[in-house]
Image (spheres, grey):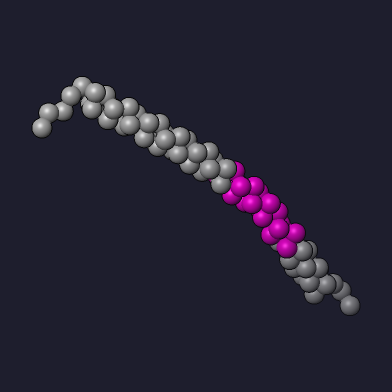
Amino acid sequence: MEIGLKENYDQLVALNTNFQIVAGDVKGLARQGEDHEARLRALERARWPLPSPAALVSIIALVVSVVGYNAPD
């Protein structure tokens, strides 16, 4: 069995086509990863302020209770 230049060329073209498809998929995955990263960062930024009011209220309650406890009768 002999493999000629035409067969080699056809296989090389098919390989190049497959490589281009895979390269496109990798680029799509990279964009998708960046999108997921941006979404996670946005969720983290939105979640961070929630504990702040709770901490502030607890500090105020502590101060009020200490001042109220130490207040002269």
The verdict on residue 40 being magenta is yes
Q: Position of residue 35 (x, y in %)?
A: 57, 43
Residue 36 point in image, percent of width and height: 56, 46
Q: Position of residue 30 (x, y in %)?
A: 48, 39
Q: Name the quarter where the C terminus is drawn.
A: bottom right
Q: Is residue 19 visible?
A: no
When the figure is inspected, residue 12 is found, relative to residue 26, above or below; the finding is: above
* Horizontal side of residue 36 vs 60, given as left or right: left
Residue at 45% x, 39% y is 25
Which residue shows up at 23% across the image and 27% down it?
7
Q: Which residues are magenta?
A: 37-54
Q: Is residue 57 visible?
A: yes
The dominant secondary structure in magenta is helix
| Residue 21 coordinates in the image, percent (x, y) | 42, 35
Residue 62 magenta: no
Q: Nearer the viewer, residue 65 or 28?
A: 28
- Taking 53 as reference, is 9 above or below it? above
